Amino acid sequence: MKFNSVLESLKTYEAGKPIELVVREYGVDPKDIIKLASNENPYGASPKVTAKIQELSKNMFMYPDDSMYELKEALANKYSVASNNIIIGSGSDQVIEFCVHAKCGEDSKVIMSKTTFAMYEIYAKQTGATILKTPDDEHNIEQFKKLYEENGADVIFLCLPNNPLGECLSKEEVYAFLRQVDENTLVIVDGAYQEYASYKDAKKQIQPSDLIHTFPNTIYLGTFSKAYSLGGMRVGYGIGHPEMIKTLHKLRPPFNITTLSLAAAIEALKDEAFVQECIAKNFEEMKQYEAYAKSNNIEYIPSYTNFITYKLPLEYISAQVAQALLEKGIIIRDLTSYGLNAIRITIGRADQNQKVLNALDEVLNSLKTAKVYD
Ligand SMILES: *Cc1c(COP(=O)(O)O)cnc(C)c1O
């Protein structure tokens, strides 16, 4: 059968490996598996959210409130915007899809950093748009400027901070660039890890209300999947100019998040103390990974997120390192598919991090020995 030809060159998104796979293939006991591959919050959801879900499980036969009134009010209040500035998606992934499909077609151009969230390219390619990437792996604002001046663009993606590398442009750099961007170019500011970046360094903080009022051609994306611990519930949002949000709603399927997801997100917003506590622990725990890298001559990218990316020395192959860890029941992310000899590890809980660093040390030592006697 013939399908839309744009799909021919399209790769399927490769998600982090699930616990179930490691149980099936390596026979590891599920309770011994450490999953630090998808940047989930390792502390789990707030107990308040869990309690609410148990209480509401009797409601699952009912469709959710499709206007998502209460969640939008709560987000509007948190970010000092209005409800009509907000659209809710099944993860912020779905909002990316709305944005790209609202803006792009075969003749469109989309600018992004060379090594960034894989879904940007996938959604863009679905429309037949041309992808233009800046030359460096990490975001470099001068390269964005140059590429934009030379080619123009319908959509520009800025991942602040960037997944899978962890770096983050400052607000000042971003604003200086946005001042030069045409009002007909949609700039998508993906703030999936903004809670972490703004905790670590106020200069990296992007405030959605300030962003969209200063630049009506931008949209800010947030998610409940990372700091808010609700990856499995699939809730994200976009904050933009009311006219833009109104257009994006034309692409939204009805009831795009579930009754329980909606309740979980509303409840999670009531427990900001829990989120802040998790973020503080994240950066405390990250220090061990930085120290390990320094003492073993592994280059790492200073991270503004809940993960750290190690660029491995040439004597190691990242896919082999990830595979050896997998066999020990530790799931991390190999970045070979991004063209890098690197691994990305989500910062876990203290007990997990200790085990991960011990296992990594064993793996690196044994791979090194294997090489010597080859
Ligand atoms: C995780 C992530 C998202 C969105 O995740 P959802 O679970 O779909 O909300 C978006 N952008 C980046 C960069 C991410 O890492």
Image (tube, helix red, strand yellow):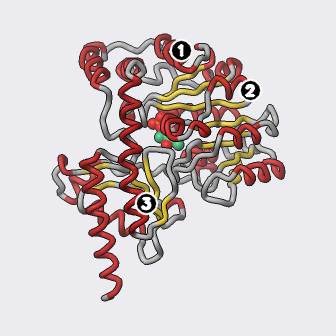
On the image, numbered disc 3 is attached to which residue?
Answer: 343
Secondary element type, mark 2:
helix
On the image, numbered disc 2 is attached to which residue?
Answer: 214
Report, in whole angstroms, how far the alpha carbon at label 3 lies from the one at label 2.
37 Å
Q: The residue under label 3 is which amino acid type?
A: Ile
Taking the spot 30% from the left edge, 37% from the top edge, the residue there is: 43
**Residue contact at pointers 1 and 2, CB within 8 angstroms:** no
Compare residues 173 and 3 and report the one nearer the observer. 173
Which one is in front in this view, the residue at disc 1 or the one at disc 3?
1
- Lower position in the chain sequence, tag 1 or tag 2: 1
Q: For the residue with label 1, is its CB less than 8 Å from the closest atom of ligand 1?
A: no
**Percent of width and height locating residue 158:** 64, 43
Q: Left or right of 147: which side holds 137?
A: left
Q: Judge whether 234 appears above or below 285 on screen.
A: above
Q: The residue under label 2 is which amino acid type?
A: Thr
Secondary element type, mark 3:
strand
Q: The residue under label 1 is which amino acid type?
A: Asn
Q: How many marks?
A: 3
Taking the spot 75% from the left edge, 52% from the top edge, the residue there is: 142
Q: Residues within 10 Å of mark 2 (few under 14, many from 20)?
A: few
Q: Judge whether 91 appears above or below 303 on screen.
A: above
Image quadrant of residue 39?
top left
On the image, numbered disc 1 is attached to which residue?
Answer: 77
